[in-house]
């Protein structure tokens, strides 16, 4: 295996620099106009201050998470004109109205194709009412049903999951859907591309969707053309353009593969070499995923079709991609896929996590690459620990983003004082996003414990109960803990005043990063 720095695989850095410079020029020019008006008249300055105060009252009275209110309130009261300017550019939610309308047009037709089987919910209620309540919440606010008749396999190593994907993709007969935050044209994707090209030659419909920001360090502008040359349909989510785009902050962070509507994959890993430890920019990479086979795969198909058509409406009949054929009965466990969107105002991913934390009786284990959480999440974790639950959180020891890593560590002390045990994955970067509750229920997916995942990104997850895969996740936590260093004692003592002030400033603006 070869080791190389992240900078050696970046293909579109020039475009990133150009876009950032273009945006900076526009922001400076607009702010100059605001400033010149403010300096021209004392009355205008007074009106700006009054407008800022009114806006503060409106923000304070809103229903958003308090963590999002505080930085705006601080900016508006301390610097009325810059605060107003920045809020008008980045703080308004109605700027996503156009994209929200697209989803509102697509979702009723798609979600009507997947309905909750009452007998499945009744069977779950008979086994565990608290788990059934979790699933009822996901169905009520995420609109995805809970399934049986689905086999689940857990992969504690992303490379193992990728090999299984290649195997299943090579058997595709009808269609392939792939949606990923990041794709790199490296060694791993070269193997995948050969499989996709082969399937196209055998008459299989292949669609690939990727996020522009997530892949901008890996792909150049001709990637779509190269994919279309081999017969693969390809789209990019929310392209980065050198014009102020208010929707640019919302990214597609999902990881989904669907084969013929019968087999599906999801988890934490993207399609880039570092995820499979072919390259090592941040030490040993730790990531996980799952393979589904059965009825629940249709939920992944719906998620993909939703995003594909939100970019450009082309499908009119979704039933072809949602086969209702017979699946071998499997009463082993219950699975519920769910998608989280920044457009509906419901932090579904965070609420699923909090419900798991609140329901924990014996143990609650968390793996996350970033730990930048709300007061509600902090309180839930510490209350669980204080009522006697063994709460442990594992984060990386080698960061991929140094600023985010510093902010992550700033949360350790408060959690530790509340009884939470904190570990750092010693070999390198831990990218898995999973929670294990009492060794019985678990989530695996794309949702980090940070504001970006919980409030800004399109995400997906899988809630599992009663599967042998949950036992495998339990073993994976034990193995990961044995490869991690506990830092709990280090953060029980206080820190110096300068560090404390710096951490407070970073955490104040963390929700806006």
Image (tube, rainbow, N blue to C red):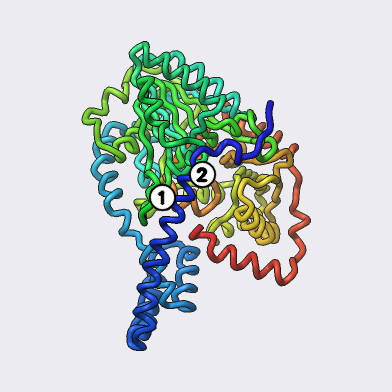
Mark 2 surroundings within 10 Å by alpha-carbon count, few (fewer than 14), some (14 through 19), many (20 or more)? some
Outermost left residue? 316
- Separation of marks 1 and 2 at Cα, in angstroms: 20 Å
In this picture, residue 226 sits left or right of residue 355:
left
Assign a secondary structure to mark 2. Answer: helix
Residue at 75 percent of width and 37 percent of height: 482
Task: Using the image as rendered, state which of residue 431 and residue 136 is in the foreground.
Answer: 431
Image: 190 above or below 408? above
Residue at 41 percent of width and 36 percent of height: 221
Task: Using the image as rendered, state which of residue 409 and residue 390 is in the foreground.
Answer: 409
- Residue 436 position, x and y percent, is 59, 40
- Residue 429 position, x and y percent, is 66, 41
Image: 153 above or below 38? above
Outermost bottom residue? 42
Task: Using the image as rendered, state which of residue 76 and residue 362 is in the foreground.
Answer: 76
- Residue 478 position, x and y percent, is 70, 36
Q: Can you identify the residue that label 1 sits on?
A: 250
Label drawn at residue 13: 2
Return the disc, 1 or 2, that comes first in the chain's sequence. Answer: 2
- Residue 20 position, x and y percent, is 46, 54
Whether residue 120 is visible, yes or no, is no
Whether residue 327 is visible, yes or no, is yes
Mark 1 surroundings within 10 Å by alpha-carbon count, few (fewer than 14), some (14 through 19), many (20 or more)? many
- Quadrant housing the N terminus: top right
Question: Is the C-beta separation of discs 1 and 2 under 8 Å?
Answer: no
In this picture, residue 507 sits left or right of residue 78:
right
Task: Using the image as rendered, state which of residue 31 and residue 383 is in the foreground.
Answer: 31
């Amino acid at each position: 295996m070869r080791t190389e720095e992240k900078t050696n695989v970046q293909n579109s850095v020039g475009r990133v620099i150009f876009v950032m410079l273009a945006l900076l020029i526009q922001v400076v020019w607009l702010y100059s106009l605001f400033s010149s008006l403010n300096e021209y008249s004392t009355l205008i300055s007074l009106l700006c201050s009054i407008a800022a105060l009114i806006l503060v009252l409106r923000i304070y009275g809103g229903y958003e998470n308090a963590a999002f209110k505080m930085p705006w309130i601080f900016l508006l009261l301390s610097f009325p004109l810059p605060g107003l300017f920045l809020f008008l550019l980045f703080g308004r939610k109605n700027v996503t109205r156009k994209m929200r309308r697209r989803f509102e047009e697509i979702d009723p037709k798609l979600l009507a194709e997947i309905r909750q089987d009452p007998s499945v919910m009744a069977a779950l209620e008979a086994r565990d009412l608290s788990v059934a309540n979790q699933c009822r919440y996901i169905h009520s606010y995420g609109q995805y049903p809970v399934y049986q008749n689905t086999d689940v396999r857990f992969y504690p190593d992303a490379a193992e999951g990728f090999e299984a994907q290649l195997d299943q993709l090579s058997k595709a007969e009808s269609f392939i859907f792939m949606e990923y935050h990041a794709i790199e044209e490296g060694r791993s994707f070269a193997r995948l591309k050969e499989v996709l090209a082969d399937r196209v030659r055998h008459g299989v419909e292949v669609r690939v969707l990727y996020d522009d920001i997530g892949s901008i360090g890996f792909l150049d502008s001709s990637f779509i053309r190269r994919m279309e040359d081999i017969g693969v349909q390809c789209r990019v989510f929310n392209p980065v353009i050198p014009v102020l785009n208010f929707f640019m902050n919302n990214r597609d962070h999902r990881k989904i593969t669907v084969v013929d509507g019968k087999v599906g994959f999801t988890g934490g890993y993207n399609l880039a070499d570092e995820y499979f430890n072919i390259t090592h920019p941040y030490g040993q990479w730790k990531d996980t995923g799952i393979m589904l086979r059965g009825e629940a795969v249709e939920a992944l198909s719906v998620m993909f079709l939703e995003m594909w058509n939100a970019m450009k409406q082309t499908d009119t009949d979704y039933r072809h991609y949602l086969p209702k054929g017979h699946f071998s009965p499997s009463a082993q466990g219950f699975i519920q896929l769910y998608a989280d969107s920044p457009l509906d105002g419901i932090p579904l991913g965070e609420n699923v996590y909090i419900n798991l934390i609140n329901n924990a009786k014996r143990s609650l284990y968390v793996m996350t690459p970033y730990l930048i959480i709300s007061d509600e999440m902090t309180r839930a974790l510490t209350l669980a620990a204080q009522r006697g639950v063994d709460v442990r959180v594992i984060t990386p020891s080698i960061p991929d983003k140094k600023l985010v890593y510093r902010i992550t560590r700033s949360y350790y002390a408060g959690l530790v004082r509340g009884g939470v045990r904190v570990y750092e994955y010693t070999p390198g970067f831990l990218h898995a996003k999973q929670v294990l509750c009492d060794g019985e229920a678990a989530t695996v997916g794309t949702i980090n414990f940070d504001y970006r995942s919980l409030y800004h990104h399109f995400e997906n997850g899988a809630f599992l109960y009663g599967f042998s895969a949950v036992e495998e996740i339990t073993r994976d936590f034990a193995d990961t803990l044995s490869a991690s260093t506990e830092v709990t004692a280090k953060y029980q003592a206080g820190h110096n005043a300068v560090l404390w002030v710096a951490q407070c400033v970073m955490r104040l603006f963390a929700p806006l990063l």
